[in-house]
Amino acid sequence: MTNIRRSMLFIPGNNPGMLQSADVFNADSIIIDLEDSVAIDEKDSARTLVTELLKSVPINNVETIVRINPFDTPFYEKDIEVIKKTNIDMILLPKATIESIKDLDERLKDTKIQIMVLIETSLGVHQVFDILNTTNRCLGLMLGGEDLCVDLNCARTKSGEELLYARMHVVNSSRALRKFVIDTPFTDTNDFEGLTKDTYFAKSIGFDGKASINPRQIDTINSVFNPTEAEINHAKRVIEAKDLALEAGKGVFSLDGKMVDLPIIKRAEKVIDTALKIGLMKIGEE
Amino acid sequence: MDILGYKKDYQLFAGTRSKIKPSIIKSSKNNQSNNKKRLSIKHVLDEIALKDGMTLSFHHHLRNGDYILNMVMEEITRRNVKDVTIFASSIFPCHKDLVKYIEQGIVTQIYAAFISGPVSEAISEGKLKKVAVMHTHGGRARIVESGELTIDLAFIGAPTCDQTGNITGKIGKSACGSIGYAVTDAHFAKTTIAITDNLVDELDDFQIGGQYIDYIVEVDAIGDSKGIVSGTTEITKNPIGLKIAKLATDVIKYSGYFKNGFSFQTGAGGTSLAVSEYLKKLMKDENIKGSYALGGITSYIVDMLKEGLFEKLYDVQCFDLGSVESIATNPNHIAISASKYANILDDCLINNLDFVILGATEIDLDFNVNVTTTSTGEIMGGSGGHSDTAYGAKVTIVVSQLFNARIPVIKNKVICKTTPGETVDVLVTERGIAINPLRTDLVEKFKNTNLPIKTIEELKAISDNLVGIPKEIDFDDKIVAVVEYRDGTVIDVIHKKNINNKG
């Protein structure tokens, strides 16, 4: 498992077939869902299914996250009670507020389970910096566009202008606190052109990755967030130039006539690191 | 060991390199009569001296919409004939009436490349008096052309037939495209009867020449058009199937055989179709053009022909209406016979095949594949062209989920060996790709790729860990079917299940 989170795939917590194959879809993280994809009269059985699955089925090489039910529902406490006894990596807290993340942090204090928040209300967007900053246990966030649009009283469109402020705002807050930030799912699962466009936009404004509600979207999302061949080649040359400059005792150096400074080196190192972790490069190639 | 109703001098399968060379007979039929038309099947049968022990042949191009077999058998059973052998290229659920005739002792033996539905259940239950013989598509042509079996009466469902008996499947209300499985029957049967629902004056373009036809009967309908193209012809939306298809396409890409002029065959299952879609994109991206696609043809392959990605399609059987329309209109979409497709005695096209994508119900650690029975031992299919194409293709790729509804695909030993492991090169599952260690060249090729290569033993261990190892099935001593390899040797037999075993 790496800390790369290009794609996060929701898997319904009441679907044994999908759960059993959760780790084959190439998603960097899977989010087993006890909330929206599980009907109210199936909450108990889904919780049992998921906990038994997590005990007995190895989920390999993929970050495992469980979306519990929201703080203000009767299922919240029961979800945490059983899920915190499993070996998952993170809990996704829906409709996160300062109050709810404080409560969840307290309930997880004796565990190694981390928190990720789902920002999907207008209050959540407004408070996002403080929510993320409540606890070190919180590693990052996901933007939930569908519920947010309901709260904002606007229509959710494919082009997504209505989410522009929220997207920019959550990226900025996350970056300020060095937390990861995941974009909302693209819900038309048959429109791969639209998915590609939406994912490129998310990448262009700073998101680390994108959530998905269908395994068929994962390869598209991953490929958009993968460093390109040109980016990898450029990064390799930056690192080579840096090594040569160090050998020559130069503090400052240039590449292709342009000055290379620390941010460029850091970006190059990140590209190489990502390419190695996702198998686009092999160790020794760098 | 004698097998009831099976040839006494049979030989056991001894590898694909065995030196068995069957003899070959030539067709000498040349019926130039201008008086072939009869009023009904009844009138034809009135003229023919029917006797016990006859062999009747049928083709399966009308698939699960076929009316011919049932309408012929209805007439046959009125005539107090017994011990009939049905030599059908495939049997589908629509042929359920056969069960009644099996129980009455009228039909005592069946030869087919594929059997599904009530007839396969009756055979599995041991109701057939003699063993069923499960051959391959190419093997069927060999059986006839070698003289091993003589067809007494061949009944050919003809979508269009002219007054001299020339037949085509390309046009007519029951058009099914290629009628490749019927060609050998027409050429070699003692008597051949064309049954058509579109009798025309004269055909210029035909697949079976009138000289091979002895009688023509016109009926209202030879099949139900809804069932005629009943193969699975939609790309899977199952994300696991799509992942497998993507990996299979990667196997093609990095195999060393993906270059201009390559040839390809895939089936009509959802995952196989997805491979053709991914392959289409790969060929465009890499600017590679293939020489031909072979086999049962679907609209997806037709699209590749239209886009210039393949030069020709050689078609023994059309799987959907798109391919039926194409074969009728595109001169590069060429109908071929089963013999030209896969007969070991013929200069057949499978021998030049580069890639074939195949399915599996079970595969064992030696890469032997079962597509004849279910995982619990009941007959539910058969080779069709499986073992023919696996033999011919340079890279035989089996695609399958590692397990389905808790039933694993990889077993220590398959219940029925349909296709020998020495002809199966790669297994692609959602959790990894196993290459047959016999293919050292491919093992070497894939070493430096990022593909999830594992041994088949490693894949089995993953599967066993997730779904466990199923209990062994308990079989009776009674043999209900013989599975013939394409050269006519016995590669396996199928036993009746023990009655107390619910599998």
Image (cartoon, coloured by chain):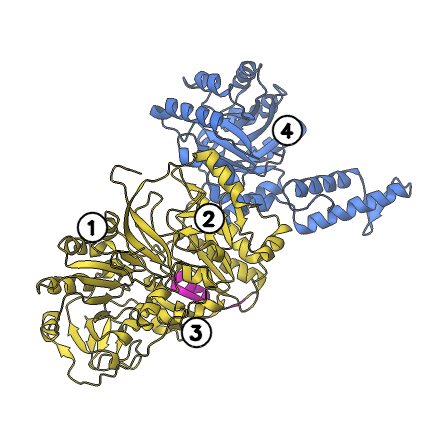
- The amino acid beneath tag 4 is Lys
In this rendered view, identify the residue nearer to me: A248 or B238.
Answer: B238
Q: Is residue B462 above or below residue B484?
A: above
Secondary structure state at the residue bearing disc 2: helix
Residue bearing mark 1: B127
| The quadrant where residue B19 appears | bottom left
Kind of residue sitting beneath label 3: Asp
Nearer the camera: disc 2 or disc 1: 1
Instruction: Judge whether residue A25 can be spotted in this image.
Output: no
Looking at the rendering, the stretch of residues picked out in magenta corresponds to B289-308
Circle 3: is it few (<14), some (14-19), or many (20+) Cα within 10 Å? few
Report the residue marked by disc 4. A179
Q: According to the image, label 2 marks what residue?
A: B242
Would residue B291 be counted in the magenta stretch?
yes
**Which label's residue is closer to the chain start, 1 or 3?**
1
In the image, are marks 4 and 1 on the same chain?
Answer: no
